[in-house]
Amino acid sequence: MIRKYLSFMMVSFLLFQACKEDSLGPEVKLGAAPTITTPSGGNTYVLEEATVADHFSDFTWTSADFGFQAAITYTVELDKAGNGFANAVALGTTNSNTLTTITNEKVNSILLAKELPGGAPADIEVRVRAKVSSDVTELISPSIAMTVTPFEAAVDYPKLQVPGSYQGWDPANTSTVITSLKSDGTYEGYIWVADPDAKHKFTQGLSWDTNWGDTGLDGTLDPGGDDIPLGAAGMYKMNVDLNQLTYTDLLTSWGLIGDATPTGWDSDTDMNYDVNTGHLTLTVDLTVGSIKFRANDGWDINLGDDGPNGKLEYNGADIAIAEAGNYTIELILNEPKYSYTVTKN
């Protein structure tokens, strides 16, 4: 009887181990990363308005080796030379070993969005990222260098429309949009919603042909999904990731804080929304010192100026006030790049 019991336990153990190994799937043994073969690197490009719609360049690369057969997603990225791809922008994504859809206009817009001046040669780097799963380490190619001279033009960032009951359900309304500064499928913007309990959706383009809602209200976007409800009226920070089909709508109230303000670093002085300009404004007495902008009386969302150049960055540097006096402050969040003005009255 004992022998039969031991035999049964041994068979059960072996079966468990076999099932366990099967559930793990193929063993991942990372091999060679992709290598860019076209262009070879060191190339020079001069972009011109007359050729804005022309093809920029083909990009080709060798296959990444993940040690097993899998569908690989390749993303071609660009950034300023020497930046370590800290602010990389996607030129395009594909499941093949070549990308042929990049236009001069797209490259020009990316470089201008990085505040590289038109007419001046810019040193940039390009690399390819290979991915099979969020559970598997990406393989990244060595970068190649090139020099590109952009031309001066208005930057046309990719946009998502945000039609809703608060603006007449109009996807053609170009003032209610959020933008993708990196052209990478992630979008952000601040939109004023004057009506409480409003609803909205997201559309790509000025019609309802491509739209997303949230069926089930689980934070996941569904093509043609249900209307998305909002709460109180106010300024909403909207973020969308079309790569993951996720979104967030966060109600924000903004204030000025700093040792130059009446309440110092202890509390905010609230700002008000101006319906005529779409800006948040405040007229206040300031002393010599520093200020910043922050949302919801906390530091999770705050804006400063690393320039200082009048442009705002999340967690940016304090903004200096050199002279005491009465000031009008404007916080401008209804543009792709957030900015501010400080005017002494």
Image (cartoon, rainbow, N blue to C red):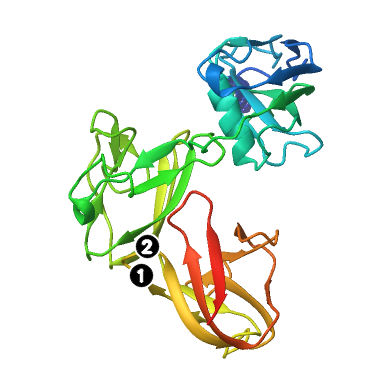
Figure quadrant of residue 100: top right
Pick the residue in front: 64 or 119: 119
Pick the residue in front: 13 or 286: 286
Dots 2 and 1: beta carbons under 8 Å? yes
Location of residue 116 with respect to 327 vertically, above or below: above
Residue at image position (48%, 62%) is 332
Figure quadrant of residue 19: top right
Q: Residue beneath label 1, please?
A: 274
Q: Amino acid at mark 2?
A: Gly
Location of residue 57 with respect to 124 vertically, above or below: above
Q: How many marks?
A: 2
In the rendered structure, the answer to whether residue 227 lies left or right of residue 337 reads left
Would you say residue 4 is visible in this rendering?
A: no
Location of residue 119 with respect to 239 vertically, above or below: above
Sort mark 1 into few (<14), some (14-19) or many (20+) by Cα contacts within 10 Å.
few
Figure quadrant of residue 36: top right
Would you say residue 255 is visible in this rendering?
A: yes
Residue at image position (44%, 35%) is 242
- Residue 281 position, x and y percent, is 44, 73
Q: Amino acid at mark 1?
A: Asp
Q: Secondary structure at mark 2?
A: loop
Q: CA distance from mark 2 to mark 1?
A: 5 Å
Q: Secondary structure at mark 1?
A: loop
Sort mark 2 into few (<14), some (14-19) or many (20+) by Cα contacts within 10 Å.
some
- Residue 337 position, x and y percent, is 53, 51
Q: Residue beneath label 2, please?
A: 278
